[in-house]
Image (cartoon, coloured by chain):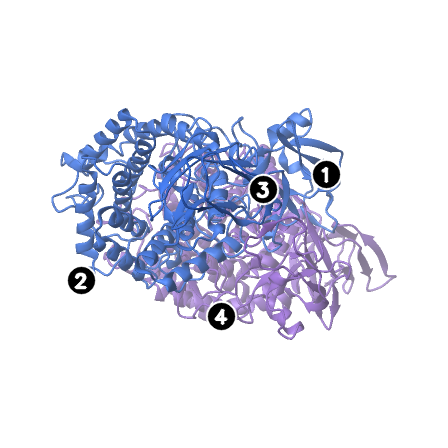
Chain colours: A blue, B purple
Amino acid sequence: MTLRPLGLDEVTITGGFWGHRQHVNATATLPHIEHWLEREGWLGNFDLAAAGRLPDGRRGREFSDSEVYKLLEAMAWEIGRAGDPALDARFRAIVARVAAAQEPDGYLGTVFGRPGQPPRWTDLEWGHELYCLGHLFQAAAARATTRPDADDGLLGVARRAADLVCELFGPAGRDAVCGHAEIEPALVALGRATGEGRYIDQAALFVERRGRGALADIEFGRAYYQDDVPVREATVLRGHAVRAGYLSAGAVDVAVERGDDELLAALARQWDNTVARRTYLTGGQGSHHQDEAFGQDWVLPPDRAYSETCAGVGSIMFSWRLLLATGRPQHADLVERTLFNVVATSPSEAGTAFFYTNTLHQRVPGTAARGDEVSPRASSSLRAPWFAVSCCPPNVARTLAGLARYVATADDDGVQLHQYTPATVRTTLPDGRPIAFDVETDYPRDGVVRVHVRGDSAAPWTLTLRVPAWASGARLRVLPAAGEPAERDVEPGSATVHRAFADGDVVELHLPVAPRLTAADPRIDAVRGCLAVERGPEVLCLESVDLAAATDGQVDDVADVGIDPSVPPREVDGAVVVRLRAAGAKDAAWPYGAPPSPNGVGDGVDVALVAYHDWAERGPSTMRVWMPIAGE
Amino acid sequence: MTLRPLGLDEVTITGGFWGHRQHVNATATLPHIEHWLEREGWLGNFDLAAAGRLPDGRRGREFSDSEVYKLLEAMAWEIGRAGDPALDARFRAIVARVAAAQEPDGYLGTVFGRPGQPPRWTDLEWGHELYCLGHLFQAAAARATTRPDADDGLLGVARRAADLVCELFGPAGRDAVCGHAEIEPALVALGRATGEGRYIDQAALFVERRGRGALADIEFGRAYYQDDVPVREATVLRGHAVRAGYLSAGAVDVAVERGDDELLAALARQWDNTVARRTYLTGGQGSHHQDEAFGQDWVLPPDRAYSETCAGVGSIMFSWRLLLATGRPQHADLVERTLFNVVATSPSEAGTAFFYTNTLHQRVPGTAARGDEVSPRASSSLRAPWFAVSCCPPNVARTLAGLARYVATADDDGVQLHQYTPATVRTTLPDGRPIAFDVETDYPRDGVVRVHVRGDSAAPWTLTLRVPAWASGARLRVLPAAGEPAERDVEPGSATVHRAFADGDVVELHLPVAPRLTAADPRIDAVRGCLAVERGPEVLCLESVDLAAATDGQVDDVADVGIDPSVPPREVDGAVVVRLRAAGAKDAAWPYGAPPSPNGVGDGVDVALVAYHDWAERGPSTMRVWMPIAGE
C-alpha cells in the first residue's frame, strides 16, 4: 500500500459542508433508519429467528438482514466519531438481537435453513447469504477499528460466521461465489481487524473464482454478477453497478494484501476505462434501469440514469482503495465528485428521505412521497423515506458517519490531504514524528483551504494537497509563522510543501471555484449539443422552480429553454446564474421532419441554478443537468 | 365503422416487396416456427395435457400456449391466402392436439388447474390464462373468416372456451381482467365470426373494468398493464407496449360495435399523443428495456430502443382499427411505417431468425446467434432463431400471412387503397356494383403506383389513394382507356378519382421516393444534433460494413463519423449515398471538459446506407439510424 489510511482517532471533521451532513446523519438519519427497520420487521426477523419461530412472520426481501448490519456499521462509525453513549447503548441492543439469532455452528441469516425455508446455500445466485454476512463483517470491523476494547460481542459473532464461511467455501470446500459481491472486501476488513490471515485468503479465493461461470447463466447474462470474465482479465466494469464496485474494492484489497501487481494493474485499468466511458458527470455509475447495470461505453442517458446511490458508495470504496494502493490523485478526484454529487444528493436536507436512483434529468414533476409510505426503489417520485429494497439509506449513513477516513492519508514522509473540509488531523509518522494540523475552509462555497500547523516539527515532513483536475489556475501560498510568505502556481494533480513546519505555519491552497461550462465527449450521444455548469466539485442543475421564478411563471418546464453559451455563467448574490433562451419547439402530429427542426431562440432570461445535491427540496419540479445549447 | 375491411378473398398480394416476404413466410418461417414449437415442447405440452400427465414434463413459460395459437392463426391466413393443402393438413394436425387438451367445461390451458399446478385464475396478473385464450380465439376467427366451412373443430374449441370465460367473468361473474390484454380484440373477432353478441359484450366488460385497480399494484406500477387509468379517461399509451397496443385495438373494436363515440375519441386522442411524442422514427414503440414499456414523452433513446417487434404488431392492430373507424389516412401512414421498419426488420432475409427488440443504434457488433440455440429475448446479438420468450416470430408470421387485409378497404361509394404493393382487388359495393382492379408497382424502390381497372363500371365509383405524409410533391395521373390523360398535384392525405371507370383505365400515383434528410423535434433529447435519412416509407441506416468498405477499412465504427448535411443524400447505382466526415473524438481520462468538445471535421467520404429492415444481414456490425451532424 502506498498510502496509509488514517482512522477516526486521527482525523475529525469539525464543521463545514460535511460536518453539517454528519450532524444530520447522526441526529436524524440513524434514528430514522432504526425506526423503519423496526417498523418493517427487518430487525424483528432476528427476534423471530432467536425464538425459533421462523419462517412464519418473516418480513422483507432476502437481503434485509444486511440493512441491519449496515445500520450497525453506520452506528459504529458514528460512535467512533462522536462517542455518544446513548447511541452506543442502542448499538449494543441491536447487536444483542442479532447475536441471539446466530446458530451454534456460526450460521447467521433469517432466510434459509429452517424447516419451511430453502436449505442454506441453495441459491447462491439470488439468496444473498454471503452478501449479508459480508455486511455483518464490515460492521464488526468498523466497531473493532473504532472501539477495539468493546465487549459487545459483535466481533465474536462475525468471527464465528466467518469461520463457517472459510470451512464451507475454503480451498477444500465448495467452489462457489455469492451472486452479489460484498463478502470479498468484508473478509479482508475482518482479517485486518482480527489479524486472521485465513479471512484474507478466503477473500482472495472468492475473487479468483469469479468470472469462470461459477454462477448460473441468467437472462441478463453472467456479466450481471461479474461472473463472465475473471477479475484479472477484465478491462472495464460491467453488469450490476453495486456488485461491480464492491467486487472491485475487495479485489484491490486482495491485490494489496498479496502484493499482486498484475491484479492491481487490471483493476486500475478497469477503473480508468470505466471513468473514461461509463461514468456520469456526477460520478454516478449505472445507466440501465433493467438490471441496475452499467451500459456499454458512452451509454449515459441523463433521463434514464440509474446512478444508484449504492453504486456511488461502491465506486467510492473502489476508488479509495486504488488511491491507497497507487497514490494517484484522480482516484481522490472521483471520490470527491461522487461524494458531492451522488452521496450528498441522495438524502434530503432533513436526512429522512432519500433518492435510490439519481436521475440527471427529471422530465415530469415527481410526486412527493408520503412520509409514512414505502416506495418502489426506482421511483420517479421525489425522495422517499423508505423503499421496498432499502439498501441506499443505510449505505449513505455508514458512508457519512465514517467520512473522516477519506480526508487524509499518511506515508513515511508526511500526510496527504485528499478532501477539503474543516478538520483536525493528528497522527504520527512511522519514525515517530508527530504531525498535527487543522484545516479551515468554507469549501466548496469558497476555494481557499487553509492548513494551520500545530506544534513545531523537529525534522521536515511533506504536506501534500490534492489539486482537482478541474482546478486549472490553482495557487499555493506558504505563510510561515516566521519568515516570508511564498506563493506559486500549482497544476492539477498534487502540490507538496516539504519543510520543518513550525507551530503557526499556514499553507493555503486557492482553488478556482468560479462556475464553468462543461461539455461532453461527442460519443456520449445522449447529451450532444448540451452544456452543463459546474462550480468547484459541484455539478449544478436547472430546476423548474427557478425558471418559473425568473420568468414570472411564463416558462415552467426545463424542456422549453436552452442555454446561451455566449454569456458565461456568473455568480450573483451567491447564486450561479446563466442566460437561458426559449427553445421554441412546436407540437406536431409527427415529431420528425425536414431539417431544421424548430429550435428558435427567444428572449434571454437570467436564471439561477442550484447545486445538484440540493435539487427537489422545494416540491415537485422538472430538472436538468445538461442544458441544450440555444440556437443549435 | 367508416371503412369496411376486405378479406383475403377480395385482395391478393401478387408480388413485390410484400409478396416476396409472404413467400418466405410461407416456405421458411412457418415450418421454422412449427419445428421450434415441437423442439421446445410447447406443442408437446398439449399432448401431455390430453394424456393427463401434466404438470410433469411441462416446458416453456406460462404463455407458451399462445405461441401455438399464433402459429395456427398464421397458418389460417396462409391457407386463406395460398390454399396449400399440405399446410391445411399440418394445421388440422395441430388443431387436433390442441382440441384434445380441452377440458369438459371448455377450459384450455397447460399451466393451471391440475393437481400439482396452481388453481385456475389464481394469478390474473402474470398467469396469462385469458391472454392465451385470446390468441386461440383470434386463430379460430381467422380460420372461420378464411375457411368458413372448415370442419376442423377449431371454432368449436374456441366457442366452448369463450362460453366458459363469459360465464366466469361475465356481469354476474368475477370482476377481473387479465394482466396482459389480448382477449379484448379476440372476443370481438370471435363474436363477429360467430355472430355471438355475448362475446362482444364480454370484451366491452373487460375494457371497462381495466384502469380501476382490478390488478395488484406492482413495482412497475399498475400502468404496466394499463390498470392505472380507465381506457376512456387515458390520454396517451403507457406501460408495457404490447399490452397497450392489444388493449387499444380491442377497445376500438368495442367502441365501434357499441357506437361509443366517447370511447373512440379517447382512443384517437391516445393514438395522436403517442405518435406525436412516444414513437420512434421507425414506428417502433416502447423505449424501456426494464418493463418493455413506453417511456415518458420524448424519451426515445436510439441505442436503448426496445421497440419490440410485437409492439409493432400491436400498434398496427390499433392503427388499422382506427383507420377503419375514422378513415383518417395518418393511421394508414403509421401502419406502413411500422410494416416497413419494424415488422419487416424482425425476420432475416431467410425468414428463420428474428429480432425481438429493434434497436436504432448498435454500438457494439452483435454476435451472431447460433442456429440451434435459444436466445434471451432482448439479446444484443444479431437475429436469433428462437427466444426463451418467443412471442415475436409467430406474431410476425401471422401479420405477414394476413397482410392482404391491410391493403384496401371499401365504403358505400368505392375502394380505398392504403398500402402499395402489386395486388388484385375484387369486391362488390353494398349496392351491388362490382369493382375490380390490379395494382402494379415496384414500390418502395420506385414511387409509381399504377392501378389498372378491370371491367367497365355501369355507374361511377370513387378510387381513393393514400398520399403519405412524407410525399410532398406527389402527382396523380388518370390515363383513360379512351380519352385524354389528366394529371394533377395531390397533397399528403388522400387523392380521389371519381368516375365511371372503364376496362383498361389506369390511375397512376407518383410518389417522390427520393432520399431525404429528417430531423427530430428537439425535445427528443437523445437524437439532438443528428439527422436520419429516409427514402419513401423506408428508414435507412449506416452500417459499419459499408463504412469500412468506403474507407478501405480505415474507419469501421459508426461512432467515428458524422453526416455532412450540405451534401444531400443521393442515389448512386441504386444505393443511397451520404457524405460522412470523421468525427475526430479523442480519448480522455475524463470525458467531460471545457467546450468545445473535440468534434473535428475530417475528410469527407461517400458511404452507402442500407434500408433499416435489411441491416445485420452481413455479419456483426455497428449501426445507426441517427447520424450526428458533422462539425456541430
Disc 4 target residue:
B28
CA gap between label 2 and label 3 equals 63 Å
Give residue B2's position: percent from left, percent from top.
64, 43
Comparing marks 4 and 3, which lies closer to the viewer? 3
* Residue situated in front as seen by the camera: A49 or A333: A333
Mark 4 nearby-residue class (10 Å; few <14, some 14–19, many ≥20): some
Mark 2 nearby-residue class (10 Å; few <14, some 14–19, many ≥20): few
Going by the numbered disc 4, the residue's amino acid type is Ala
A85 in relation to A471, above or below? above
The subunit letter for the residue under badge 2 reads: A
Q: Using the rendered image, report if marks 1 and 2 lie on a common chain.
A: yes
CA gap between label 4 and label 3 equals 82 Å
Asked whether the residues under the numbered discs 1 and 4 touch, taking CB atoms below 8 Å apart as contact, a structural biologist would say no
Mark 4 residue element: helix
The subunit letter for the residue under badge 1 reads: A
* Residue situated in front as seen by the camera: A223 or A260: A260
Going by the numbered disc 2, the residue's amino acid type is Ala
Mark 3 residue element: strand
Going by the numbered disc 3, the residue's amino acid type is Ala
Q: Quadrant of residue A568?
A: top right
Of marks 3 and 1, which one's residue comes earlier in the chain? 3
Residue at position x 26%, y 32% in the image:
A41
Asked whether the residues under the numbered discs 1 and 2 touch, taking CB atoms below 8 Å apart as contact, a structural biologist would say no
Q: Using the rendered image, report if marks 1 and 4 lie on a common chain.
A: no
Give residue B538's position: percent from left, percent from top.
66, 60
Comparing marks 3 and 1, which lies closer to the viewer? 3
